[in-house]
Image: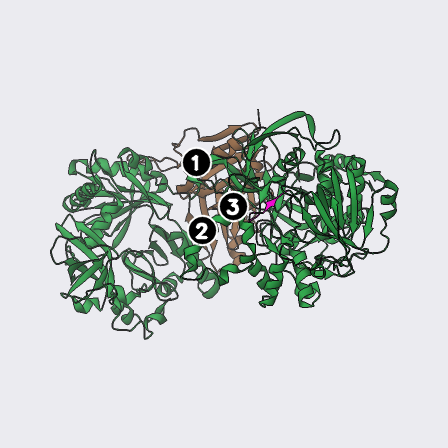
Amino acid sequence: MNQNTLPASPGLRAISSLGTAPGATPQLIAQSAGLRVVEEPFLQLASLRLSRKADRAAALGALPFDLPATPNGWTGDAASSLARFEPNAWMLISVAPRALPESADAWVVTDLSSRLASVRLQGARAPAVLAAATSVSLPVSGFTRTLFAETVPVLLQRLADDDYRLLIDVSLAGYLSSWLADASRLTAPAK
Amino acid sequence: MSQAFRSSQGGRIDRSRPLRFRFDGREYTGYVGDTLASALLANGVRVTGRSFKYHRPRGLMAAGFEEANTLVQLESGARTQPNLRATQIELYDGLEARAVNCWPNARHDVFGFFQLLKPFWPAGFYYKTFMAPSWHLYEPAIRHGAGLGVSPKLADPDVYDKCHAQADVIVVGAGPSGLAAAIAAARDGASVVLVDDKPALGGSLQYEPGLVEGLPAADWLKAREDEIRSLPNIRVLGCTTAFGYYDHNHLLANELLPAGGTSPRQRLWKIRGRQIVLATGALERPLVFPNNDRPGVMLAGAALQYLHRHGVLPGRRVAIATNNDSAYAVAFELRKAGVEVVQIADSRGGQPAPLAQAQVLGIPVTMTCAPTDTRGRSGLQRVELHDVNGQGQAQPGTGRWLDADVLLVSGGWNPTVHLFSQSGGALRFDDQQQAFVPHRLAQAGHLVGAAAGQAERDIAVEAARVAGRDAAANRIVRELAPVASTAQAALWSVNVEAIGRGPSKSWVDFASDSTESDLRLSARENFVSVEHFKRYTTTGMMTDQGKTSNVNAIGILSGVLGKAPGEVGTTRFRPPFNPVTFGAIAGRNVGAYYRPLRQLAAQEAHDAAGAKMEDYGAWMRPAFYPQAGEQESATIHREVLAVRSGVGILDYSPLGKILVQGPDAAEFLTRVYVNNVRTLKVGACRYGLMLGEDGIVKDDGVLTRWSENSYLVGTTSGQADRIVEWMEEWLQCEWVDLDVTVESVTTQWAVVMLAGPKAREVLSRLDSGIDLAAAAFPHMSAREGRIGDVPVRVARVSFTGELGYEISVPWQYGLSLWNALLEAGKPLGIIPFGIESLMVMRTEKGFLHVGSDTDGLTLPQDVGFGAIIDKKPEDFIGRRTTMTPDGRRTDRRQLVGLAPVDGASLLPVGGHVVDAAFKAASGHTQGWVTSSFMSPTLGRPVALALVERGRERLGEQVQVFDGGKLLPAKIVSMTAYDPEGERLRM
């Protein structure tokens, strides 16, 4: 969900897992030479799962957008992308809201906007910081499910050479943030 | 002592940068570029350790990771590290170390008299002696006497890091062959990681003289270093020891980092390579002869390293014993450095190639000659030599003594095949080289240089280039062709029987203190398999993994058994090749990162309310909310009564939530649940039970049908992720015909539980658009609504026994919902309550808690699901077990209530249920107490228990046995509170 389209309730107010209110500046987790780690609050996230019995070609053709055909790949750009994370499952990741098909015979669409927190790692040191935690060397346009620090499942998206997006269960966002801040300090070049 | 054995020039040390250090309480100096070992040698320290079992004095025998004698305890306090090899510790200013396994120091060890007991403590003595009355009586004292270093007792203040890397080609070893392979692979475009345990490239080029491809070694190395710097696709990891080679070319290596600051102390690398080139070199074998462990007996190759790498002379008068040509080169280099080489004793006959040069240099050489004994109080002073025949037997009447302060030995070379063996590679014994050499590869890679058995440097370098190119092109090699080499003569041990002596002090494994006589004893007792004799004698089982002992031991055993060494075979080497600290293995997964704990959306509110947070299934959840000065029991008492009489609020977000959707969702869940799922109406909830394939109760929760093909499955908090994976496994492996998708939405929704007779009134103050009237929204049903624009889902269910609602909103609204409900309930006296109070209330009500009230034997009929199973026509996971004779036993333990007869005593959880006639602890247990609390509501204890035939014994008196005490109790209904369930239907 984009911060501009979050449901406005007279009674309830949203706040991100790292404490950012809609419209506020996202949490800066770490920033030093060659590295910027920042929260990406309130993304629109949804899984699109293809029904086993659906006519695959017809189902794919009926979508208003193209899905990546490559396993562990994604299409689009940092603002809006579709990533394939299982043989019959894709994930929409979007800063601005996008229309999605309703769950119907061919597709099961599930809103996961609240379930996953997103963190961006950018800069020349981003690969080194990430290498301390994950075993996957992704190509640009790669997207995969892996373990972070050998303990926590994450989804990892490489947006550019030095630009990564980590999606993690929202209840573990605090852990991830603290870990990355620590790693940033440990890997900082000597002054 | 002022570095009396330091040469005036040479070595890769910086003489302008002295370093002070302490060993065994004495102060010494060394230089930048020294290891602790080289600095000790330079200072003339001969006794650097004590042996493992017999506390014999030992000195440095090697210069690298094969050192078996000099293990030290480095530093003290929190940063202490036990059992490090002095040969692997780079010297730094202020270093403090002491020898392990001795007291007060290695020079004067009060346990030194143990060596007199050797005749009574042969290998395997503890299998035969110290048996009466029990080995365990003696074990602590023996282990205390035989131990090595001491583990740190304080928390390690340092940080250890990990790093993952990938490469097309990983090259292990930066000697000439490793460099050639790495450069060749990189030149062909491959990404290369080059790993070496030393800070500088070059391996043996750092200390071995001679030419490489026509250039002096130093010039050739300089050219390769320049070349590597020009190749951006080579990543060099120095001071990094590869210690584990696992499946799929996964290599583990440990990098030692400079001390100081807040930087990590070590970094564990996890590197995956398409191909791995092993250029791990070769290890020199010692010679086995009586008293070959005296300080001053050293591997010849090690002396060369100390001379050229560190500028240290091994001694003043050096004797050399060898069975191959390599030791001659050492003699020549020592001679050039001004050391007196008093004798080369060569066990071979004939005219070896270097003999002429030795004669030119005036070094005495005696052929068919080998050492048979040594003398010296705190270090070597004399060496006894005998003539030997072709089988290594000393000839009577040929003995003579030689004065020498150092005896350099060389018994031949073994390719360093440890990593290769770890990878699954097979070895073969090469008769020409008299060594085990790599044969069949199990993973994609190559072996080059001495590791492949190639001793000729130029040939090895060229072959390594070919291997590097092959690795870059990902060409697969299955089997290594034999390498052309000159014939070597094995000398597994010097046989002294003919001169009337035995091998009881002919040390084979210096680290484990095993001798040739131990090996012979092992064979006599029929421990002849390589696996058996290894364990019987402990040869190769110490921290050096037998790097200098294994092959000699196999050679000796082959002689005893009359078999070829290849027939005796080798054991598989296991990781780690070199000891690794636990700190490096743990990395940063310590402290708060040891086990990541999940946080609730309303964490901030719980903290503000003073909640006592505890770990429940990896979630940090409020256990209770104490007021100032309030004890836990008082808090729970207060919270329970407040809920029973008014309204309470609980953060229930961690409960597992799994969305099961698709046209076959009902069929799938019918197979997964004990309950009937098809009859569940849209908008209705049902409590359900899942079994494992073994029929044992696996999990439970509330199932909600949100639409025709969409269900929300509730699970326990700790099991949520496992249940998702388990469902996926069934769908992907067994029921591939079912059109169902499974999605975890546990943290998509934050959930707040409202419980108590005033819960409806509180909820009604938040305008959700849902008709909350009892008739419109009955117990065990669910409705959707909106609070403002925020979607809200409300399930009317209860785990407290009171009117209850579970209200779900998207996670980011969880905190706001919590605060809004607290605000709305303020006029009604709402209070937050924690998990501990919930547990009390569910026990009062007799609600099952899977994990507390079930164990690894509990079937559904044991917890009251027998009738449901009998009525259900469809099959489901685990059903078969419920129908086995064991499942149908009438004396199964069943979940019932227990009430203390005195109405006041709290029955202990885990206390055994026994009959009224029970007297002693050896009697039959009929079950045990599973949950037990003092009920604030009822003013008396309540308990649940699994009891044999419990349901048919309601009203019967039993006893609960715990800690020698017996408490009379009565078997009662599980439901102590509101048995008619009227409060749920308010």
Q: Are marks 1 and 3 in contact (CB under 8 Å)?
A: no
Instruction: Residue B974: give x, y in percent of width and height.
Output: 19, 60
Lower position in the chain sequence, tag 2 or tag 3: 3
Tag in front: 2 or 3? 3
Instruction: Residue B646: give x, y in percent of width and height.
Output: 15, 43
Asked if residue B914 shows in the view, the reply is yes
Q: Are marks 2 and 3 in contact (CB under 8 Å)?
A: no
Q: Residues within 10 Å of mark 3 (few under 14, many from 20)?
A: some
Q: Is residue A79 above or below residue B426?
A: above
Q: Quadrant of the N terminus of chain B?
A: top right
Q: Residues within 10 Å of mark 1 (few under 14, many from 20)?
A: many
- How many marks are shown on the rendered structure? 3
Q: Which residue is mark 3?
A: B111
The answer for which chain carries disc 1 is: A
Instruction: Tell me which chain appears green.
Output: B
Q: Main structural element of the magenta stretch: helix, strand or loop?
A: loop
Q: Amino acid at mark 2?
A: Ala
| Tags 1 and 2 on a common chain | no
Instruction: Residue B652: give x, y in percent of width and height.
Output: 30, 46
Q: Which residue is mark 2?
A: B141
Instruction: Tell me which chain appears brown.
Output: A
Instruction: Residue B600: give x, y in percent of width and height.
Output: 34, 41
Toward the viewer: B726 or B812? B726
The answer for which chain carries disc 2 is: B
Q: Which residue is mark 1?
A: A41
Residue range corresponding to the magenta coloring = B51-59
Q: Residue at x 57, y 67 (%)?
A: B525
Label 2 – label 3 distance at C-alpha: 13 Å
Asked if residue A95 shows in the view, the reply is no
